[in-house]
Amino acid sequence: MAVRGYDENEEKKSYGSVFLLGTSLLVAVSLWSLWDDNITRRPWKKFQTEFYRLDYRKAKAAYDEEDKKLKADPGYQDLVKKLAAAEDSLTRGELAKKLKSLRAEEARATVRFGDLDQEVKFIKSELEEAWYEYDHAVQQGRNTKRYQETIQELEKEKAKVDPQLEAARQKREQLKEEIKNLDAGIKELENQLSKMAAERDKWIRVMENATVNLGLLSIYKIPKIRQIVLDEFDRNNFDEPTGRVDRCQTCHIAANRPGFENEPQPFRTHSRREVLLADSAHSPDKFGCTVCHEGQGAAVNSVRQAHGEVSYWEFPLLRGAKAQSSCASCHLDVQKLQDAPLLAQGQRIFEQIGCTGCHLVQGYENIPKIGPSLRRINAKADASWMVRWIANSHNYRPQTRMPNFSFKEDEATAIAAYLWSASKEEGDKWLEGHPAPAGFREGDKEMAAKGKNLAEAVGCKGCHGLAEGEASTVLGKEKEIIPNLKNIAAKVGPRWIYYWVKNPRDFSPDTRMPSLRLSDQEALAITTYLATLGSKSEAIAGIEEKLGDAKNAKRGEALVRKYGCFGCHDIPGMEKESRIGVELSTFGSKTLEELFFGNRADIRHTWDDWTYNKLKTPRIYATERIEQVMPQFNLAEEDIKALRILLASFRDKKVPSRYTADRSQRAVQVVEGRRLMHQYNCIGCHEIENRGGFIRKYYENPALAPPPLNGEGEKVQSHWLFGFLKEPIPLRPWLNVRMPTFNFSDQEANLLIGFFNGLSRVEIPYAYFDDRKVPKEHLDAARILVSKEYFNCFSCHKQGDKNPEGPQEGWAPDLNLARSRLNPNWIIKWLQDPQKVQPGTKMPSFFPGGPDNIMGGKDEKQIEALRDYIVMLGTKAPGADGGRTASR
Amino acid sequence: MKKAMLVFLVAALVTLPLSSLLAYEGGAVSDGGTISGVVKFKGAAPAPKKVEVTKDKEVCAKTAKNDPTLIVSGGNLVNAVVSITDIKKGKKMAPQKVTMDQNGCEYKPHVLAFIVGSSVDILNPDGILHNVHSYSKANSPFNMAQPKFKKTITVKIDKPEAISVKCDVHGWMSGWLFAAENPYFSVTDNSGSFKLTDVPPGTYTLEVWHETLGKVSQKVTVKAKQEAKVTFEMEKK
Ligand SMILES: [Cu+2]
């Protein structure tokens, strides 16, 4: 009978195979997941193991090398033998017996000392008790005699035991000392040996660090993730601070270890490690790697992921020079960073080639327009030259900063017509007041020769080239920030040149060109000379009418607005126009979706490629529908590279202040002051921050060139420098070259002083020198030292009206000026070693080696005395009554 | 012990710069020959230019001075240095102790040649301030004051170089320190002639250096115990 629901066949069926299949699948999946979790997705484990092996092998090799040296070193082997002998004699022979008995004796002495010590302690506590009873009895008015007796007895007992205890202590110490003396020889030998073997034995520690010891077994260290967390370094989409996890050193394990410079990545030592990864710079333990190199710091699953070279990760690894673009995230003053030359170069180009005329960038908002004012252009430039210049500036001067807008001739004519009409009123008025210079004779050879000499002597070449190939300050590879004048006659005429060289600010109040304080005759000579450079432009037929045509002018105005000429030039009526380009403050963070590639299919879609091609061919992404107006700058490849590094540094991420470098007021002053310094091209003549002084190449005798200004902040007093900048005085009358008058505003002069002080790290710009504290003996001694018999300082140095003998070029600065000009502390430094302060200076070192018979022959004393004397020279009666004996 | 010394020697040789290793090996020369000759000046000999003493006349103007930068005597060039530039082995070479005097505000000799590594005593018997300003490039430049009380300054020149020396106090004073790489050098005398002795037989490059006229060189072959005659000619470039 069949039970309901019971299927006999079903009961007889075996499910064994299904279970087996299920179980083996489960086992397989478990194994696979274990494998995947531990091996496939942990490539870093392999790297680390590989590294430990490498580390161990290198250390072993180094150890063997050192060991071989020691084995070959007879001194070391000698010590080894001595040590062995000494140890031997301590384990066997007479010494060994003595040591044994001493040790036994020491043990006994220790026991004896312990016993006595215990005894004394007991007596002491009994005494305490007796005293307590005594005090108690006194307070209760009982008889105290009993207690007094007990106390006396105990004191007596203690007095008896105390010396015994002391004797026992001494005995024990003495025995200890004797044993130590027996050992001392060995200790000393061991010390010497370990000192000699230090170079070898340090490798033992390295080997130990790469391995783990499991009893007798030694295996390579077990790999583990090495990570650094930068608290609150990043911000999430809700603008909340988040930490950054940086695990790069899991594989790049030797980045901060010397000795792996030639190993393949990921094991290589970081380049310039001692500087870049120093604790005072970017210790990897504090900053990790992604702060500079980007990538996906938390990823360890694959090299590509870790390097962030995968889709949708916005910060791919920055290799090599590209990492320089990260410097600007934390460093305000990038110009002083020795290890970011491309970034610094890019910044110089960016600031000086006019990018900021069209593009707004945070931190670069206040850079003045770089081109000349066109307010009176019709009174200055030749009309036909002007049209050609606008059409393609690079034809006239290939190195000019003015970019080429590729205007057609009719467009260029229209723009010129507009500029003519806009400047007509002011230009004509200026012309009225400035008639052609009387006495100018075109082509007067004698006068032109005079002008040429003068132009070269007063320092025109500090900024302007006057012939083919001559250049002073070069921007980037070959851009001129100041025009070469070899073909100036094509552009301007003698009437304008004359008034311009006499006083540039008369024509253009905001020009950067300074006044060289030329007399009328000098200006005339230079005008005659300049008018011979190049030839006049060939006139375009009917140019007058074309420029006078109102229709042309109207069209020109539209073009000027469209192309944003006012970004670089001051144009009447367009003072309020704003920049026509896009803001670039966060350009470096632009994603590919934000970059317009037009119809270019031949350009790889990366930020780098987009930017490179944009800088190389600015209108490359234009399409039939979308016009682009950025002009062609003709940048050299290396300049594009530098600019790309800078542009990549314009990021939207702001690094929290606790991670940033110096952003103090001083750093700001240095940055802004340097910018001003570049604007006025101080480095054309002067070497500053060990850069520049380009005019020096024209001087055979460096003493006749403008002085280098490295360390100027430390050298001169701020208030003196202020006065000098505002109104230069001839400090070195023997120089032909003139420090020009720049008409700096108070603000500009202060900015430059802040710049020099910041560079020299001058903390306190004003320091008081107390005349009354100058000891008389200093002045007396110095008076002898400066005399003809000794240092003969005035053989070269001027002193007020007293001039040295011989020709002017052999003279040295007026020491009467030192008081108001020089920092007293700098004078000390200068006297100690002039060559160190200013390599190549004519000033010889007088020290070390001052005379023995003055101030006890002590150099420092003599230097101090000379300093005091020099500072006092500038007072009305030099030295004479300044030398009151002082109370110090 | 010997082995250890060897190891040390090898280590020392490896760590020393290669140039010094290849420089020169000195020893005894038994069958050496001689190179002698003159350096001729091509072109019209310049008239001696008087140097105008503008300073410290009571001391410096005692003796008349001519511009020392180009002196031609009987058609031959004075104060040129003739040296062998490519000799690796020859007579013994040891640092010398040489002297340059500033007597009368003039460097004497005007060109002082010596073996590299030598000490140069610079004397100041004038009783006035001079300064010794070197314009060296290979050696580190110096500019030392030499006041009246400092009768002697000693400098050591460690690298081969022709060093211009000037006094900034007396603009006309100029001289040269010529530190030679090997002991085969000779400054042409007042008749423009020079002589190099104990030269091992062989073919060498002989170079003449002059402060104003630059350098000229030629090959010369020396035979054992014989004299090779050489004539140089230099001209204004
Ligand atoms: Cu002198």
Image (spheres, rainbow, N blue to C red):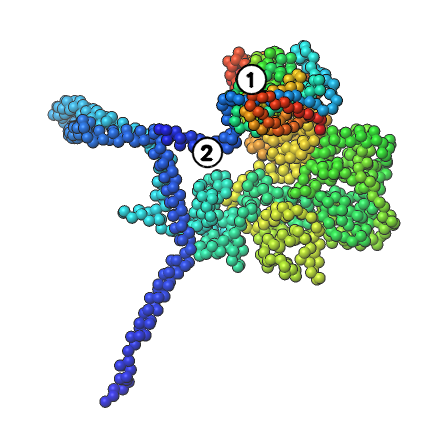
For disc 1, the chain is B
Q: Nearer the viewer, residue A592 or A564?
A: A592
A281 displayed left or right of B228: left
For disc 2, the chain is B
Q: Residue at x 34, y 68 (%)?
A: A26
Q: Residues within 10 Å of mark 2 (few under 14, many from 20)?
A: few
The residue tagged with tag 2: helix, strand or loop?
A: helix
The numbered mark at residue B14 is: 2
Q: Nearer the viewer, residue B83 or A597?
A: B83
Badge 2 amino acid: Val
Return the disc, 1 or 2, that comes first in the chain's sequence: 2
Badge 1 amino acid: Val
Q: Residue at x 68, y 53 (%)?
A: A618
Q: Residues within 10 Å of mark 1 (few under 14, many from 20)?
A: some
Q: Residue furthest bottom?
A: A1
A307 displayed left or right of B228: left
Q: Position of residue A837 (x, y in %)?
A: 58, 27
